[in-house]
Amino acid sequence: MTAVDQRALSGVTVLELRSIGPGPLAGMLLADMGADVIRIDRPGAAPRGAADNVAPAHRGKRSVSIDLKSPGGRDLLLTMVEKADVLIEGSRPGVMERLGLGPSECLERNPKLVYGRMTGWGQDGPLASAAGHDINYVALSGALDGMGSDPAGPPVPAVSYVGDFGGGTMFLVFGVLCALRVAEQSGVGQVVDASMVDGVAALSAPYHGLIADNKWHLGRGRNVIDGGAPFYHAYKTSDDQYVTIASAEPQFYQLLRDTLELTDPLWDAQHDEGSWEAQQQKLAAIFLTKTRSQWCELLEGTDVCFAPVLSLVEAPNHPHNVARGNFLTVGGVVQPAPAPRLSSTPGAVSGPPPAAGAHTREVLREMGISDDDIEKLAAADAVAISES
């Protein structure tokens, strides 16, 4: 048995209807853990975002090009659903139903199917049919209000990490795996309604507790872990780079004081919010006296709780990431390694991202479609075949 055969999700077949944002990353995570993820591409459609050959989110998958708007394409997908364990789609509510490929049609063909739906607002509610993007979903969940260190300025979105990939991808994968377990035990599939608003709201649970306990200030830059505290902050260095400190606990804060020789009584009251602005200004001046590398030599690996701010290009070369094998190269593209790490059935990358339609013939043969029928589907433009 090969290493790939031993991965945790080996034997699970996933149909991923091509989308953008959280859907492809969810497919990548499932593929890394051994699922056979078959990406359903629309013939002739140009990829959005990074080109297929350099997009890590599409690694380890196979691609079949199907025109789902054609009768032949619709029927073909329903035939594939019969052999699948999971279907993932990222269309607006109602789109799949109008194609005749909604949950009712698919579950009728395969009662064990897990039908994963990824949207921003959810399948129902007053905003369900509206367009939106990551920043909108994070805003409505209440999370965006606390992002950014300037209380008087606008909130600063955390790129797409919080909405698309935190509230979206991770909750879609979590829901799919939960539903898969139920299907394996009961033989009954179900619909996973994953929305970014729902997911980000769930991620905010600890802060609702702090609010209830009067330990969280609403707004930006007013709390310990949102950049308000001088000892939990990012600072500019003399070479125009940045470093971070997170000396929140008393013993870590004392080590920071000892290391930077912060002997003035100003530093005695760590949680005196009235002193934070003055402390922050003094620390900003101190960190401007050395380069990022010099600060790393002094503070990295200590209990000050320190790390340099690395770019996405720099991060793969940091010694800790190298030692952990946190990044690898696939098809000439540097990218994150599979995560998390499973001790007995570790994840692995099966291969580089496929070109659209690269596995149409191969997959359809596996699904029991004859060569004659494949040629008929291609002649009717229901599928596209692009093997090279």
Image (spheres, grey):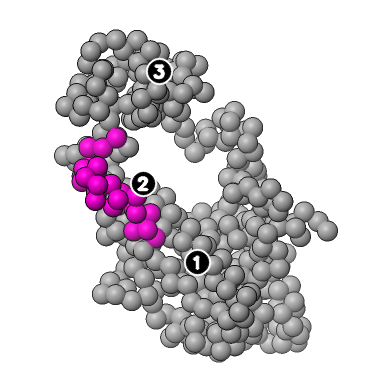
**Can residue 167 be seen here?**
yes
The residue at 33%/76% (across/down) is 124
**Can residue 382 be seen here?**
no
Amino acid type, label 2: Ala
Mark 1 crowd level (few <14, some 14–19, many ≥20, 10 Å Cα):
some
Asked whether 311 falls inside the magenta stretch, the response is no
* Precedes in sequence: disc 3 or disc 1: 1
* Mark 2 lies on residue: 158
Residue 52 found in image quarter: bottom right
Q: Tell me the magenta residue range.
A: 199-224
**How far is disc 2 from disc 1 in space, using C-alphas?**
24 Å
Please state which of the two labelled residues, at mark 2 or mark 1, is closer to the viewer. 1
Q: Is residue 73 above or below residue 49?
A: below
**How far is disc 2 from disc 3 in space, using C-alphas?**
30 Å
Would residue 15 be found to the left or right of residue 312 on screen? right
The residue at 73%/84% (across/down) is 369
The residue at 58%/31% (across/down) is 320
Pinpoint residue 248: horizontal percent, then vertical percent.
Answer: 36, 29
* Mark 1 lies on residue: 175
Q: Is residue 267 above or below residue 347?
A: above
Mark 2 element type: loop
* Mark 3 lies on residue: 255
Please state which of the two labelled residues, at mark 3 or mark 1, is closer to the viewer. 3
Please state which of the two labelled residues, at mark 2 or mark 3, is closer to the viewer. 3
Mark 3 element type: helix
